[in-house]
Image: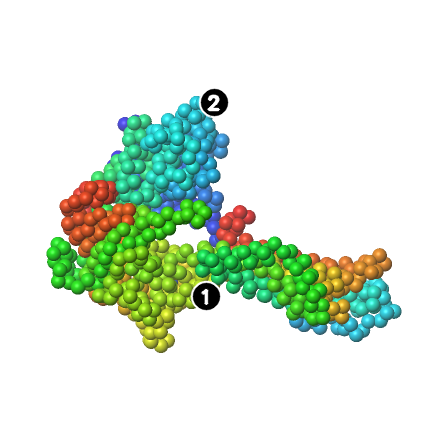
Amino acid sequence: MSAPLLSVRDLKVAFRTQTGDREVLHGIDFDIMPGETVAIVGESGSGKSTTASAIIRLLPGAGRVTEGSITLDGRQLTTMSTGDMERVRGREIGYVPQDPMSNLNPVWSIGFQVKEAIRANGIATNRKDVERRAIEVLQQAGLADAEKRLHQFPHQFSGGMRQRALIGIGLAADPKLLIADEPTSALDVTVQRVILDHMARLTAERGTSLLLITHDLGLAAERAEKVIVMKDGEIVESGPSRVILENPLHPYTRRLVAAAPSLASKRIQAVHEREGIATAEQLADTRPAVAVKDLTKDYKIRQGGFRSEPFRAVDAVSFEIPRGKTLALVGESGSGKSTVAKMILKLEEPTSGTIEVAGQDVAKLDRREAFALRRRMQPVFQDPYGTLDPLRNIANTIAEPLEIHKVGDGASRRARVRELLDQVSLPRELETRYPNELSGGQRQRVAIARALALKPDIVVLDEAVSALDVLVQDQILQLLAELQHELDLTYLFITHDLAVVRVVADLVCVMEKGKVVEQGSVDEIFTAPVQEYTQRLLAAIPGAEITLGGGPAAP
Amino acid sequence: MEHYVAPVKDAAVVVDAIRIDEKPRNLWSDAWTDLRRRPLFWISLVVVVIILLMAVWPTLFTQVPPNNDCQLANSNEGPASGHPLGFTFQGCDVWSRIVWGARTSLSVGLLATLIGSLIGLVMGALAGFYGGWLDSLLSRIGDIFFSIPYILAALVVMSVFSQYRNVFTLAFAIGGFAWASTARIVRAEVLRVRQADFVTASLALGQSRFGTLIGHVVPNAIAPLLVVTTLSLAAAIVAEATLTFLGVGLGGNVMSWGNDISQAQQSLRVAPMALIWPSIALTVTVLAFIMLGELIRDALDPRARARR
């Protein structure tokens, strides 16, 4: 067996804070062999990105390596001089950052930024060679018309193209190791698949080792030979990816495998007798809670001056949600799914088409009726950090809808707030606390409690779990399922994540470029998708075809 | 590679544990932790507190009446027992006049800042929140006021209303022309806060647009305004002194640092200290407010905190 390319031993990293040093990595050991792909999987705060930053010695200001060693090809990286380290970065270790939107400088052309990387790494020095190499790099990154692209600016590139350019820059100097920190988390699934395939081909051709940092266990298992699971700055389990997935031994890994929606195959059932809907025919006798017909929304895109061009964001969308069921509206970014949600919530006016809620045409309501309608329909949004007013305590946040709609008096509102906290499984002591003391999942629970305060029939969940860690996501999905059963709620579930759809929805409506391309029950869509687009979406779910052992651990 | 499993510490995996016994942390408490370790903060705070005390209880600092006890025999005399800073041209006690003058300077400063901030807050909040033609209109009005030097504008206003030369008119003249930069800051902040989901959530709950603006947007947009307020307070105090010095501010019978400086200039060569002492009082006060404002601004900005 050959010697490892990268070897990390007993790595400890601490951050300086106002109250003294706080250790965030408590002794990490792992090896990467030449040509091998290793994935570090963990939730936010597990230390996976800190590990990556420590390897390339780019820890944020207050962080430093306190103990342990990192060796690349037998050379110590931790004690290397700054100048030597600069030569290692780029030439021997390439890096692909997480967010393609903010990691390219918007004021310089793509070509300038690629050439900068080439010159900095001393691959070519004279102008012609640099230019030729830059075109080569972009061609290898899979950008057609590389020569023309060289002179374009980041805003003229889509997210996928930017990430390709960044991968190109990362690989420009033929490094021995490429570190990719959540390289595709900000991208649509179909784009993610293409990018990952491309990155895998490039690294395989050159024999580059790849360290993949991700939160997605399915993706890690699909792409890496070896998986390292991290939690709270420690490695809890590591080994060949199939073994970890099929036979997880540590209770934390077992939970993680069980909770990963990309790996699950069944709808969450609050009560076991309750059955999902098997076919669309069964719906005929259930009255729809929400019926949308030919819904269309045009925006005007300003063209400079007074000219404007119409842009159809939503194009003749129709669907019905039966009472007490969940319809998932799925689509990639720009598909118009959130615009549909906004129109149903009456935050946007439709250009044409009708929205009926419990048989009432929403457009024909007067002010008072529209106000009353808001009591029956409530939203929960994506960003747990933006959804709560940081200056209001939890009780006031949850009581706000009661105050706006003048429901009950002070005492009954307080009682209702306590009841709601119980319903979303939060302790009553949180009443007087402020949102910044809560985690993302807890904030989302508060947002759900606020949405339920007026006892609505319909809840619109706009990417409500997309920003949460897998285990927390799983908990919130469980909670939503329980609440749906208890309170007979109807959900409109907006998401980009097909994997989540399978565990929460009864019906699916797939949108592409403003149009509904396919709709049906979850079983129909997942087992026999008709449209090519739907098939492509399903195929792009990472790790979908991996069979599991393990099974859920005790909760 | 072998399959490694870490020793299991506790079998039950707790997800999303709630830790409510931890000390609550927020922007303000973090800022406070940062501020209280800075000597400059304490120095400027002490100065500000002393000036405030002078304004409220001048008799705490001096027993000598500033106006009624002036004797021409003492004109331009140096320090004497009970009169630590000497006498003015009119034979009044310099220290006493500085102490009593603090009230005028602060009243004009506070009032002008209050007026300026209120106008700026209303204009900026409406422009930022409602957008569209209202934004265009209010922002253009702001631009017009921004382009007029407010000392010049206040000078014109005070000359026109020369028969009403008191603290209120002066504060209105200064504040009424100094709100444009505040409005810009508030507008930018409101534009940022407006994007937050809690604003959309409030609208979806059925809250009116205006109710959402008052209840959610403005409280979250106000932090940078507080910092600007201390800076404009300093600017307004300077403006008062300037206008009074030029003879269009407060009447000659009003005790203010501007008046003291103005009156001392005629005997600058024989008794420079009568001019220098009120100037020092003015400078120290203004510096204290500016430093306080900048320290608070840095403390509220975590990135600025990390830089130091």
Measured from the top left, where is residue A342 in percent x and y?
32, 57
Side of B211 where A30 appears, left or right: left
Q: Which residue is drawn at 81% across and 65% down?
A: B88
User: From what the image shows, is residue A514 above or below residue A492?
Assistant: above
Q: Is mark 2 on a helix, strand or loop?
A: loop
- Chain designation of label 2: A
Task: Give a yes or no on whether discs 1 and 2 share a subunit.
Answer: no
Q: In which quarter of the image is residue A96?
A: top left
Residue A433, disc: none
Residue B198 in the image, given as x and y percentages of width and height: 38, 60
Q: Is residue B279 left or right of residue B299?
A: right
- Examine the rendered structure and indicate whether residue A509 appears above or below residue B212: above
Callout 1: chain: B
Task: Residue at 36% x, 61% y: name it.
Answer: B201
> Which residue is at the front of the view, B44 or A151?
A151
Residue A549, image x and y in percent?
17, 45
**Residue A423 seen in render:** no
- Three-letter code, disc 1: Ile
Q: Position of residue A285 (x, y in %)?
A: 13, 62
Q: Would residue A312 be seen by someone viewing this image from the given angle? A: yes
Q: Tell whether label 2 touches label 1 (CB within 8 Å).
A: no
At x 29%, y 45%, the residue is A216
Front-most of residues A449 and B40: A449
Check disc 2 and report the residue beneath it.
A126
Q: Mark 1 points at which residue?
A: B214
Task: Please tell me whether mark 1 or mark 2 is closer to you in this view.
Answer: 1
Q: In which quarter of the image is the N terminus of chain A?
A: top left
User: What's the residue type where badge 2 is placed?
Assistant: Asn
